[in-house]
Image: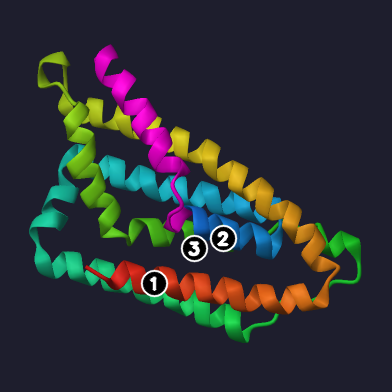
Amino acid sequence: MLDAHALMLFIPAMLAIALAPGPDMLFVLAQSVRGGVRRGLVAVAGIISGGIVHIGAAAIGLSALLVRSAVLFSLVKYVGAAYLIVLGIRAFIVAEPVAADPARRATPPGSAPFVQGFVTNVLNPKVALFVLAFLPQFVEPGRGNVGSQIVELGAIWYATAAVVLCGVALAGGNFDRWRRANPIARRTERYVTGTIFVALGARAALP
C-alpha cells in the first residue's frame, strides 16, 4: 500500500516527466507522422510494454545487477543505440510506398512499430537507472513489500506516460493526413524521421 503523501508528490513529478520532450515522445511522433494515428498508438503500446519489463526487473532486482555490471550495461546500451541508428538509416533509404487506393492506406500498421518501441525501450539501460534511482525515493518499507510498491509506482508512471504519448500519436496522425497529399512533405518527412532515429541512437550511446 502506497503512502498517500508520497503519491501527492509522485504523480505531479511523473506528469512533468511525461510531458517533457524525450526519446519516447520523439519515437511516437516519428511513427505517427509516418504512418498515422494507429501506427503511433501501436508504438505507444510497444514502449509501455518495454517499460513493464523494466519495472518487473527492478521489482525482482535484475536492474540492480545490470547497473552494477559495467560490461553488461555498456553492451545493452550500445546494442540499443545501434538498433535506433539502423532504423534511422532505413528511413533514409527506404521510400514509403504511395497507395492510390484509400483502402490500402487504411491497412493496420502491423507489429513493426510495436516491436521497435518495445526493443528500443528494453535496450535502454538508462530507463533501468531511472527506475532504480527515482522510484525507491517513494517506497516506504514499513508499508509492505518493496517489490509490490515499485510495481504500483511503475504502473502509475507508465499510465501517465501512456496518456501523454497517445496525445502525441493523435497530433502526429493529424499531420500524417496532410503529408500523404503532399509529395514534398513525404520526402521531407523521410529525412526528418531518419534524423530523429539516428539522433536518438547517438544520444543513447552517450554517457
**Position above or below: 20 against 194:** above
Say which residue appears at 17% left-offset and 48% top-offset.
62
Sequence-earlier tag: 1 or 3: 3
Return the mark for residue 116. 3
Return the mark for residue 113. 2
- Closer to the observer: label 2 or label 1? 1
Amino acid type at circle 1 is Gly
Amino acid type at circle 2 is Pro
Asked which secondary structure carries label 3, the reply is helix
- The quarter in which the N terminus is drawn is top left
Pick the residue in front: 36 or 186. Answer: 186
Which class describes the residues within 10 Å of circle 1: few (<14), some (14-19), or many (20+)? many
Q: Give the magenta range.
A: 3-24
**Position above or below: 70 against 133:** below
Q: What x and y, as percent, mark residue 41?
A: 61, 48
Say which residue appears at 41% left-offset and 73% top-offset.
83
Image check: 178 left or right of 50? right
> Cβ–Cβ below 8 Å for labels 3 and 2?
yes
Asked which secondary structure carries label 1, the reply is helix
Residue with the mark numbered 1: 201
Determine if residue 179 is in view: yes
